[in-house]
Image: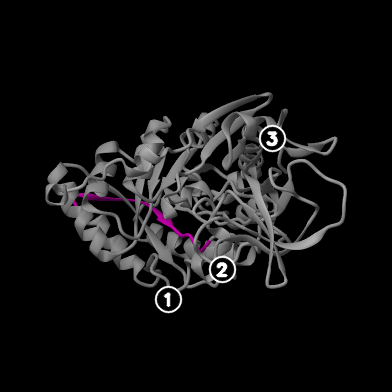
Amino acid sequence: MHFFLYRDGELYCEEVPIREIAREVGTPFYLYSHRTLERHWRVFDGALEALPHLICYSVKANSNLAVIRTFVKLGAGVDVVSGGELFRAMEAGVRSDKVVFSGVGKTEGEIRYGLRTGILMFNVESEGELELMEEIARQEGLKAPISFRVNPDIDASTHPYVATGLRSSKFGIDIALAPELYRRVAGSRHLEVKGISCHIGSQLTELGPFLEAFDRLKDLYHLLRGEGIEVQYVDLGGGLGIPYKDEYPPHPEEYGRAMASRAEGMDCLFVFEPGRVLVGNAGVLITKVLYRKRNGGKEFVVVDAGMNDLIRPTLYGAYHEILSVREREGERAAVDVVGPICETGDYFAKGRELGPVEPGDLLAIMGAGAYGFSMASNYNSRPRAAEVMVKGGDLYVVRKRETYQDIVRGESIPEFLR
């Protein structure tokens, strides 16, 4: 459920008409509903009440400081995959002992930063990373808190770009090799076993893969505990999907019940890393219609947002519902909704049935709160869009629109070209 609703043919975000926001901040812009973010958090947290748990919001889904802060104020930790995300999370006020640092390619600088920050644990993904972490911990005079991200070789039945639990993917450590690595950590003066981690993919719409992964982690947990290796945390990752079109993912309550049914006999704190399920439907991309044109027998609606603002349709073939901010009476027609980028792949929808729209009208691209702005770029030297958050009847610009000067900041012309 979200709080983007029509009133008398006008689309609102909570109590604010979206057309009013567009007049104030211009287009395109990302728009987030605080009430939706908060509601999604409470539903997900409540669904896990039968388990001792810590929710670590997956910052990669949407890394805006105001979004992170919303969840931190509700008690969340964070899952980060870079030093930049760790910095953002700390700026948003997260407690360092609620930070899980994941990622297959952590640099020496990022590992050192995480150690000095005092994070809860690193999800280690290779032997090489473990060796580097041990050496850095020795240099720092600290113990690195270790959880191995194990790869259970499970087909999550999702888009291949976001399937991360298969043996053929770059992520994690073969679960069969994990016991020996845990024994190595347990015998180290500079490493400390904290937990077991697993993340099998994103936008999952069935419970089966989650439960299969849980069972394999549970077997490893009992094996390690049987050898006297204490495991305090079992990190079950994220990946619960949302409805973009015809998907019917499990409700968080169903997910929570299923997880709790597997947890008997496990004395640990369970870590969950939701991202999309918290923010996906809490955000939309608002764009203005520039032109209508006909070409080669096709009808195009050209808008001022582009694939640099929202790349999911081009990258994943993803579906996003598109709504008119102000409904017009008239017949619907099949159109391609496209942006201004110099790429044929710059589109938001193909052959989509839309009601009548004219230049100057506003469209809302729904379900854009996750992997929208966080994947945006300056391709074609386009300034990135503004981000706005609404709470009740108030709006807040939580990221200013970039200027042309912003996009060349840091560049310089060397003397020999002057």
- Residue furthest front in the image: 418
Residue 21 in view in this figure: yes
Q: Residue furthest bottom?
A: 168
When asked about the image quadrant of residue 131, the answer is bottom left
> From mark 1 to mark 2, how far is it between C-alphas?
14 Å
Q: Position of residue 30 (x, y in %)?
A: 57, 41
Mark 3 or 2, nearer chain start: 3
Q: Nearer the viewer, residue 65 or 298?
A: 298
User: Residue at the spot x=26%, y=49% of the render?
Assistant: 111
**Which amino acid, by three-letter code, is at mark 2?**
His
Residues drawn in magenta: 188-201
Using the image as rendered, state which of residue 263 and residue 238 is in the foreground: 238
The answer to whether any part of residue 120 appears in the image is no
Q: Horizontal and vertical percent for residue 142? A: 20, 42
Using the image, tell me which numbered label, if any, was put on residue 18. 3
Count the labels in the image: 3
Of mark 1 and mark 2, the one earlier in the sequence is 2
Is the residue under label 3 in contact with that under label 1 (CB below 8 Å)? no
The answer to if 191 sits in the magenta stretch is: yes
Q: Is label 3 in a helix, a strand or a loop?
A: helix
| Residue 159: image tag | 2
Report the residue at 56% width, 49% height from top: 370
Identified by mark 3, the residue type is: Ile
Residue at point 51%, 58% (across, down): 341
41 relative to 180, above or below: above
Q: Position of residue 388 (x, y in %)?
A: 56, 34
* Residue bearing the label numbered 1: 168
Which of label 1 and label 2 is nearer to you? 2
Report whether 94 appears left or right of 408: right
113 sits left or right of 8 in the view: left
Q: Quadrant of residue 202?
A: bottom right
